[in-house]
């Protein structure tokens, strides 16, 4: 009996895997932002450094350098319309200004891991750019008195694109996903 259940489970898993790879994913539609869907992005990388800015009146300003950023940024929408995908880091950075992040920097949580300890740093992210050596550099203004480590081997940043303009709505956002996709598509070779 136990052998039959194990075999049945193996067949079910194999069938699901085959169906997943054979059946094409339906084309994703742009989420309906008027009905409270928000978009989040994740970036990752290795070898991160924080350098505090010596600006009076801005005690929580840092320059963050990720020496080896991942080449892809993952995006996903929140319920009720669940959708996800990836975009190249270069395309994501190219879309930064056109979608309004220069004008209104997004909130983020920068998750720093050193293999043993983990710390979360809530911040806004501004002016991200790739240096000629491939490092990703951006300004982070911390949202609380958290003191980040000076350096760590691994980092992930979770960026919330919700601009907060739908006051009173359910976690809503008017973030321009169609505009983002248009800007990204323009840069695709």
Image: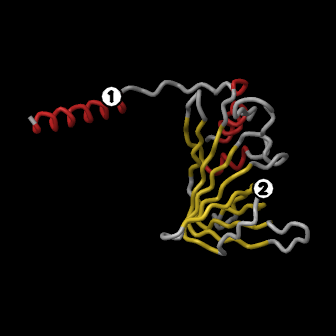
Q: Relative to residue 138, is residue 9 drawn left or right?
A: left
Q: Is 164 placed above or below 50 here?
A: above
Q: Is residue 56 above or below residue 25?
A: below
Q: Which residue occupies 62% across, 61% down?
A: 120
**Residue 16 at x, y = what percent?**
31, 31
Report x, y in % for residue 71.
56, 54
Would you identify the image quadrant in which residue 76 lies?
A: top right
Above or below, comparing residue 161 to residue 33 in the picture: below
- Tell me which residue sits at (78%, 61%) in the image: 141
Within-10-Å neighbours for mark 2: few <14, some 14–19, many 20+:
many
| Front residue (pair 85, 124) | 124
Label 2: element kind: strand
Quarter of the view holding residue 174: top right
Q: Position of residue 186 (x, y in %)?
A: 69, 37
SS for callout 1:
helix
Q: Nearer the viewer, residue 101 or 124?
A: 124
Residue at numbered disc 2: 126
* Mark toward the start of the polypeptide (1 vs 2): 1
Give whichever of 144, 111 is nearer the camera.
Answer: 144
Please report the residue visible at 55 percent of the width from the left and 70 percent of the height from the top.
153
Instruction: Give the camera-side residue of 133 and 11.
Output: 11
Does the CB distance between marks 1 and 2 fall below 8 Å? no
By what rule are the colours in the image chosen? secondary structure
The quarter of the rendered structure image containing the C terminus is top right
Question: With 73 as the anchor, is 142 left or right in this view?
Answer: right
> Badge 1, how many Cα within 10 Å: few under 14, some, many 20+?
few
Q: Position of residue 176 (x, y in %)?
A: 73, 33
Which residue appears farthest toward the right when viewing the image?
Answer: 56
Q: Residue at left 75%, top 67%?
A: 63
Q: CA distance from mark 1 to mark 2?
A: 42 Å
Residue 19, label in figure: 1
């Amino acid at each position: 009996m136990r052998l039959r259940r194990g075999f049945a489970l193996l067949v079910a898993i194999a069938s699901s895997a085959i169906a997943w790879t054979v059946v094409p994913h339906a084309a994703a539609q742009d989420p309906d932002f008027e009905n409270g869907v928000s978009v989040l992005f994740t970036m990752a990388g290795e070898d991160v450094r924080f350098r505090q800015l010596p600006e009076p009146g801005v005690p929580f300003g840092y320059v963050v350098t990720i020496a080896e950023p991942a080449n892809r940024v993952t995006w996903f929408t929140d319920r009720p319309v669940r959708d996800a995908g990836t975009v190249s880091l270069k395309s994501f950075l190219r879309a930064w200004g056109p979608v309004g992040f220069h004008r209104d920097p997004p909130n983020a949580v920068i998750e720093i891991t050193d293999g043993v300890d983990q710390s979360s740093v809530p911040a806004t992210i501004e002016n991200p750019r790739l240096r000629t050596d491939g490092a990703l550099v951006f300004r982070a203004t911390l949202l609380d008195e958290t003191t980040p480590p000076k350096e760590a081997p691994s980092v992930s940043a979770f960026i919330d694109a919700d601009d907060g303009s739908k006051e009173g709505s359910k976690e809503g956002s008017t973030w321009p996903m169609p505009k983002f996709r248009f800007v990204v598509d323009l840069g695709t070779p």
